[in-house]
Image (cartoon, helix red, strand yellow):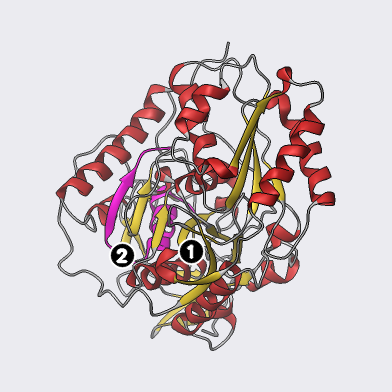
Amino acid sequence: MKSGFLKIHYNDNVFIAIDPLKKNELINVNGLNVKILEDIPGGHKIALKNIGGNENILKYGHVIGHAVIDIPAGSWVHSHNIKTNLNEIIEYSYNPVESKPEKIHDNFSTFLGYRRKNGRVATRNEIWIINTVGCVNSSAERIAKLCNQKFSRENFDGVFTFSHPYGCSQLGDDLESTQKVLSGLMKNPNAGGVLVLGLGCENNQMKLLLQKAAGIDEERLRFFNSQDVKDEIEDGVKLIGELFDAMRNDKREECPVSELVLGMKCGGSDGFSGITANPLVGRITDKLTSYNGSVVLTEVPEMFGAEQQLMNRAADKKVYDKIVWMINSFKEYFINHNQPVYENPSPGNKEGGITTLEEKSLGAIQKGGTSIINEVLDYGEQITKKGLVLLKAPGNDGVSATAMTVSGATMILFTTGRGTPLGFPVPTVKISTNTNLSERKPGWIDFNAGEVLDSNIGFDELADKLFEFIIQVASGKIKTKNEINNYKEIAIWKDGVTL
């Protein structure tokens, strides 16, 4: 796709500057001559024809807002002259798609993973220290550091802890959310062993948290409260040693890709996110679900304006009703906190070329490909079905990626046009939307989707290349940049009273 501009859909009345366009430049867009009336940044929109005030703006073949003034052909189309069409709570209808993607035999492709006692398959074999409360964050970090110096062998990927400020002074649903997240992390198959480190006096009591984690392999679980021992560092290292011994026979084995659970995330989006990286990841969604694998899609506020497309892909009326619940309950969350439902995109998104939430959402949901949606999860719930699954969580990078890890994702594909060093407990594959970002930040980016813009490679070929990269990462043959840099963090959705 070697061109300085792109019209995405034949119905669109705007096109996209791939490279910056200069004032008075004359270009031909699909047979239509357009004179550029002002300097246009790369990733931004240009009017393909004269657009009248109040006329709808079309991108991706869908409405992304309306013009607030007359926009002459060749003009920059952005926040100064278009506005969202979205309202708050609206009525939806179920118009199911006619056909479903054809399933391929689930043993068609394989990777090397760790099969756990409960049958789930991990992409890494690690020991995770889970803190009941923020008071023991530093203690957990000291234990992890000492253990990584002491314990090492083939087929063991290290000891990790994930700091957070919660667990004390929380009440009700807010405390329960923290417990759901921490217990869900304990159940993630990439945690071959778990040490739960508590203080003793916190609201998030050890006994209650362990009850939430019912079903975890007790041979791979150790726990204690720091107030109950003389030296919590010494005791922590001792218990990690026991877990290390319990994991001594763990080996990678050939597993069908149907055992993979991928979380799909976009952060720091730009004008190319919906053109390169997100549609590329959408092809991975369709490919993996065709093998009967699992994909988790979240960031609910970034579905607003495109939610009807997702609803029409519900496997049945029950799933459709849950999508409606997920969308409307999230809108009510904004309203209950006296915040505008459509306060999006972010300043960075706008600088990159995204103007309205409809535009951002239409680009964001492309990560879900065209697959049928088989399940809808509440925040903190775990995946139970194969195929594409929607999860209720906000768009915040840390919160949403943590929520997908809690739901069972063993790898995350993270598309970005702006770049971020952020990483999560599971391998996080950073996919740049443009080559410039990939070249500027090689310490952050794992894969460049911008190749489809500046080379002759097509989406299908690049998707095959990315899928093979995913297999290599899942098999432990490639470490992601977040792993190399040890950027592994969590964030918990806070919604309640703090004492």
Quadrant (top left/top right/bottom left/bottom right) for the C terminus: top right
Where is residue 240, by image quadrant? top right
The image shows residue 251 at horizontal and vertical percentages of 60, 66
Q: Which residue is mark 1?
A: 45
Q: Is residue 369 magenta?
A: yes
410 or 114, nearer to the observer = 114
Q: Residues within 10 Å of mark 1 (few under 14, many from 20)?
A: many
The tag on residue 159 is none
Direction bottom: furthest residue: 456
Q: Amino acid at mark 2?
A: Ser
Find out whether the residues at labels 1 and 2 contact each other: C-beta distance under 8 Å.
Answer: no
Q: Which residue is mark 2?
A: 371
Q: Does residue 269 appear in the picture of this structure?
A: yes
Residue 363 higher or lower than 110, as above or below? above
* Residue at image location 48% in from the left, 64% down from the top: 45
The image shows residue 426 at horizontal and vertical percentages of 59, 54
* SS label for mark 1: strand
Segment tinted magenta in the rendering: 354-379
* SS label for mark 2: loop
The image shows residue 355 at horizontal and vertical percentages of 48, 52
Looking at marks 1 and 2 on the same chain, the residue that comes earlier in the sequence is marked by 1
Q: Is residue 49 magenta?
A: no
18 or 33, nearer to the observer = 18
Residue 166 higher or lower than 269, as above or below? above
105 or 337, nearer to the observer = 105
| 243 horizontally vs 6: left or right | right
Q: Residues within 10 Å of mark 2 (few under 14, many from 20)?
A: many
Q: Nearer the viewer, mark 1 or mark 2?
A: 2
Q: Amino acid at mark 1?
A: Lys
Q: Does residue 422 appear in the picture of this structure?
A: no
Work out how far the residue at label 1 is from the one at label 2, CA to CA, in angstroms.
29 Å
* Residue at image location 50% in from the left, 55% down from the top: 265
